[in-house]
């Protein structure tokens, strides 16, 4: 990966080795359409088993709500060697929240995870990949180093990691529903992706939701198809000598900003 820069941002020197980031947004089932938590009860254990079998590490962005409801599940994620980041407190779009509401979500979600794991999270992703730039200050003041609340497929179409002040911003490469395509189509997609892709998925997508009354793109390919596609994805990249890394791993490859101090409001 080469250098990247965005207006108002800073250049990021790409990694010499081939790497891939697998990320997981841990939340209730398909919000806001469902109130169930089958993803936590069924999907998450299956996902952890697949990751263990393949020897792959991931970054899990966890809502404070799920950490309070399923503390042992979240501890298991951490014990398994994965990074635990924050997904806000409740699954609420930050672009719909005022400053005080957004601050409360960041702080409460962060403190919930810190109390549970005795470790403060340093990576953040907002629900629906929606985090206004002016709220970066909230993350900086709460101790975050990495934000992955942007997508390469949404305006302004950032394709590579970049900096907003001292915050490393890491775009998700494709939407999670792409990983649920029929495998022949998914194989074609892999050939078109950049050298350091960032994938994301949800535990509820590993549960068969095909009979639920939710949007087609939310239920299509859930369950066994995603489980099989994930196994293929891991084999595909490992077979090409690509290393799976976490958001924290990526940050540690960018030491030039560690001395920067976040600006006050």
Image (cartoon, rainbow, N blue to C red):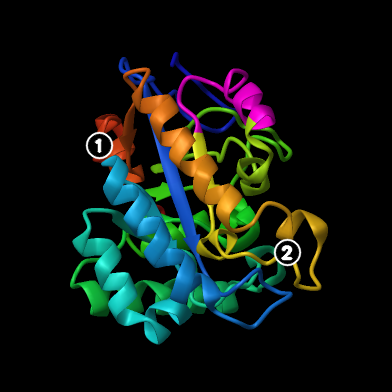
Towards the viewer: 13 or 207: 207
What residue lies at 68% left-to-right and 40% top-to-bottom?
Answer: 181
172 is higher (above) or lower (below) than 197: below
Bounds of the magenta segment: 184-197
Task: From the top left corner, tell me how far across and down residue 217 is, in percent.
Answer: 77, 54
Residue 224 lies left or right of residue 244; in this view the side is right
The image position of residue 161, as x and y in percent, is 48, 32
Looking at the rendered structure, the secondary structure element under dot 1 is helix
Instruction: Give the answer, above or below, for where 150 lies relative to 13.
Output: below
Determine which residue is flagged by label 1. Answer: 252
The residue most toward the bottom is 69
User: Considering only order in the chain, which callout, 2 or 1, is on the residue closer to the N terminus?
Assistant: 2
Q: Residue at x 18, y 72 (%)?
A: 118
In space, the residues marked 1 and 2 are separated at their CA atoms by 40 Å
- Find residue 199 and name its label: none
Q: Which one is in front, 208 or 6?
A: 208
SS class, disc 2: loop
Do the residues bearing badges 1 and 2 touch, measured as CB atoms within 8 Å?
no
Magenta highlight on residue 190 = yes
Where residue 235 sits: x, y (%)?
A: 39, 30
Q: Is residue 80 left or right of residue 32?
A: left
Crowdedness near tag 2: few (<14), some (14–19) or many (≥20) residues, C-alpha within 10 Å: some
Asked whether the viewer can see residue 94, the reply is: yes
Q: Nearer the viewer, residue 11 or 187?
A: 187
Residue 79: quadrant of the picture: bottom left
Q: Dot 1 surroundings within 10 Å: few (below 14), some, or many (20 or more)?
A: few
Q: Is residue 82 a member of the stretch shown in magenta?
A: no
Residue designated by label 2: 210
Closer mark to the observer between disc 1 and disc 2: 2
Quarter in which the N terminus is drawn: top left
Q: Quadrant of residue 16?
A: top left
């Amino acid at each position: 990966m080469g250098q990247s820069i965005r207006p108002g941002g800073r250049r990021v020197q790409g990694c010499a080795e081939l790497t891939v980031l697998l990320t997981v947004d841990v939340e209730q089932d398909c919000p806001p359409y469902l109130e169930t938590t089958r993803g936590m009860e069924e999907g998450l254990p299956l996902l952890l088993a697949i990751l263990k079998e393949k020897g792959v590490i991931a970054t899990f962005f966890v809502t404070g709500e799920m950490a309070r409801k399923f503390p042992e599940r979240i501890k298991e994620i951490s014990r398994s060697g994965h990074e635990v980041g924050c997904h806000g407190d409740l699954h609420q779009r930050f672009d719909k929240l005022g400053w005080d509401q957004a601050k409360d979500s960041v702080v409460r979600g962060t403190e919930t995870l810190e109390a549970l794991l005795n470790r403060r999270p340093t990576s953040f992703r907002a629900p629906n990949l929606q985090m206004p730039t002016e709220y970066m200050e909230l993350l900086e003041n709460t101790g975050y180093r990495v934000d992955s609340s942007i997508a390469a497929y949404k305006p302004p179409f950032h394709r590579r990691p970049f900096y907003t002040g001292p915050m490393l911003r890491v775009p998700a490469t494709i939407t999670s529903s792409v990983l649920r395509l029929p495998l022949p189509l998914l194989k074609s997609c892999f050939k078109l992706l950049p050298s350091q892709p960032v994938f994301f998925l949800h535990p509820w997508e590993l549960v068969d939701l095909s009979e639920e009354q939710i949007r087609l793109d939310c239920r299509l390919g859930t369950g066994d198809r995603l489980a099989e596609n994930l196994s293929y994805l891991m084999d595909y990249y490992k077979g090409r000598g690509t290393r799976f890394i976490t958001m924290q791993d990526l940050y540690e490859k960018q030491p030039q900003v560690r001395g920067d101090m976040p600006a006050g409001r």
